[in-house]
Image (cartoon, rainbow, N blue to C red):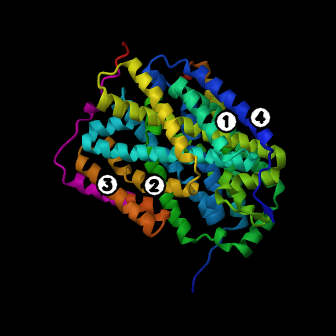
Amino acid sequence: MSSMKAILEPEVGWILLGILSVFWIILGIRLGKKAANMEGFMVAGRNVGLAFGVATAMATWVTSNTTMLAPQFALEMGIWGMIAYSTASFGLFLFAPLAQRIKKLMPNGLTSGDFVRMRYGRTSWIVFLVISIFYAFTWLVSMAMAGGILMQAVSGIHYQLGMTVILFVCVTYTIFGGLYAVIGTDFIQSMIILIGVVVVGIGIIIKLDFHVIYNDLRTDQPMLVNALLPASIMAIFNNMLFGIGEVFHSNVWWSRAFAMRKNIGKKAYFLAGIFWFPVPIAAGFIALSANSLGLNITSPDMVGPFVASNLLGYAGSIIVFIVLFCSLASSIDSLLAALSDLITEDIYRKMINPDARDKQLRKASLFIIIGIGVLTWMICMPRIGTLATVLFFAGPMVASTIWPIATGLFWKKATKEGAISGMVLGTISGLICYFVWGWFTASLVGAVVSMAAVLIATKFSRSEFNFENLDEKPIPKKI
Amino acid sequence: MTTEWYFSETFIITLIISALVLISIAVITLIVFFIRDIKSKEVW
């Protein structure tokens, strides 16, 4: 039985890491030169076209969690596990009409926090910021951890060194180029990821005798091909709601909605959802062969890269390394930019220095990005838990924001009482379920409780919100 | 007595190949969009 050890030598890993790091930093800095003011830095000039719009939405959603957790889902829950992970694309589909509405109602908007503050008031805004910042940090930590784990697993580069380099690269080009650098690099990263997934997928199909694998699964692990597995079916709804919650509330997606040209957002998010849907299936199916290949899987979240590297040898390992690096970078840079925007705009500008002008905001943003990078690095230094444990803890929190966000954008009668109770009760009930029944129920319960709270509050609401109040003045450009 | 229903081998292979084909279409579509955006000067 083959055990999990690196396929590439550390020297090769360092060369690949060095080339990719220099390439992304130079490209990010060059693209970022367009960011002449804070609006350019935060929302890329609000004029992003369809190609970059689709690519950035998709590349950001193809994270290391997709390339690592989708195979883990397939390994542990079989066919339904892969499909369950794919349902995260519903977040992108359903955000499409919201993106159009956001652009229409908030032509000068900068963050999702701006919306909650103006729509529901200060208390809801603070609750939302706590959830949103906690979630973004959780996601960022899981990405950086994944970076270290992957570098070590594929090439033998030590966890702490690999994680440090990836964080450093993303922090560097995000500081210089903001969302321009993030969206520009996302396009190339998305192409590399998609082509890499197809090449690896085809290579594995050619190498494997699927008939043997299927028979082995039916004999040794029938649960994985069982079409009526309750836990897996539950995971579909949980993952779908987690995905919807993640996209609806997160400034990662709102900043792209603000950045896209008028009438592009709806189409871009819808296409990104369609293009993203097959990725977890293509990345996940290879884990089904682990048993037939006699691989000793000691770390489930590494099963995908490990099987691919074992089957495709040296060349396959290099492709896996590049795809994984791109999937990490495309998400880490997006999170750094979106989280720093949220802190710069909602905390620094709105709470600390309301008169801050362009240059002050840019300076604050620089320190915030570095601060986020350093804090993430410190949290990631000791390797904590598995990726799923870290990520799914935030599930009920984000699922509880779905209804306050969606109803707030479309219903005049949606109230702050509904929003606050929805987010607080949804989070509490979801977390209770997380600890009592398991992660696969947490987002589901959080979303349902939040829905009930929002709908009841809206039913008895007498107020009607004027959506014109969401059109806030832009940041003054002159110092 | 419980009824067990399994995914067939054909279904699983079709699912995987469809996924790979759809991703290939995504790559081509993105390239087409990019060329079109460059021509109409609407990249960003």
* Residue A15: image tag: 4
The residue under label 1 is A191
Sequence order check, earlier mark of 1 and 4? 4
Q: Amino acid at mark 2?
A: Gly
At numbered mark 3, what does the secondary structure look like: helix, strand or loop? Answer: helix
Q: Is residue A176 magenta?
A: no
The answer for which chain carries disc 3 is A
Sequence order check, earlier mark of 3 and 4? 4
Q: Position of residue A150 (x, y in %)?
A: 68, 48
Q: Position of residue A375 (x, y in %)?
A: 49, 40
The residue under label 3 is A424
Q: CA distance from mark 2 to mark 3?
A: 13 Å
The answer for which chain carries disc 1 is A
Q: Quadrant of the N terminus of chain A?
A: bottom right
Q: Is residue A471 magenta?
A: yes
At numbered mark 1, what does the secondary structure look like: helix, strand or loop? Answer: helix
Q: Nearer the viewer, residue A87 or A475?
A: A475
Residue at image position (58%, 50%) is A382
Q: Nearer the viewer, residue B32 or A61?
A: A61
Q: Position of residue A250 (x, y in %)?
A: 43, 42
Residue at image position (76%, 71%) is A216
* Residue A356: image tag: none
In the image, residue A381 sits, relative to residue B29, either above or below, namely below
Label 3: how many Cα within 10 Å (few below 14, some 14–19, many 20+): many
Label 4: how many Cα within 10 Å (few below 14, some 14–19, many 20+): few
In the image, residue A247 sits, relative to residue A48, either above or below, namely below
The residue under label 2 is A395
Q: CA distance from mark 2 to mark 1?
A: 29 Å
Q: Amino acid at mark 4?
A: Ile
Q: Amino acid at mark 3?
A: Val
Q: CA distance from mark 3 to mark 4?
A: 48 Å
